[in-house]
Amino acid sequence: MQATWSERYERFFELLEQSENLIPNAAVLPRWIGKSARFWYERSGESGRAYRVVDAQEGETVCDIPVATRLSRHSRTISQSLSTARKRY
């Protein structure tokens, strides 16, 4: 019996998830920044996860932002937002 598209889709993502452990950063899922020629994506490195910003027109990396840096800069804002959200419910 041939697999349905839903089953194929699930199997694809299972294999993709498994390959992340074998081949880090094998897939790039770009998130375009507005209508610019720049996008960002998440990647794994020796020092942990980071966001990489790329200028597609120039074909160059603009910057790498470690996730830990980003979180520490915004931790106060995040905790305030969470506190406010909890009070609403």
Image: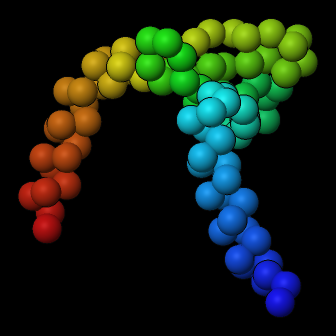
Q: Position of residue 71 (x, y in %)?
A: 33, 25
Viewer can see residue 53: yes
Image quarter of residue 54: top right
Q: Quadrant of the N terminus?
A: bottom right
Report the label total: 0
- From the viewer's side, name the closer residue of 71 and 83: 71
**Lateral position of residue 88 relative to residue 14, left or right:** left
Residue at the left extreme? 87
The image quadrant where one finds the C terminus is bottom left
- Identify which residue, 33 or 56, lies in the foreground: 56
Looking at the picture, how far across and down is residue 84, in whole percent?
A: 15, 49
Look at the image and tell me whether residue 33 can be seen. Answer: no
Give me the residue at 73% from left, 11% from top: 61
- Does residue 37 appear left or right of residue 45 in this picture? right
Q: Residue most toward the right?
A: 57
Relative side of 24 to 45, left or right = right
Which residue sits at x=72%, y=78%? 6
- Residue 35, by quadrant, is top right
Task: Kindly identify the residue that appears in the image at 18 percent across and 37 percent down.
Answer: 79
Say left or right for 30 vs 21.
right
Does 17 appear above or below 31? below
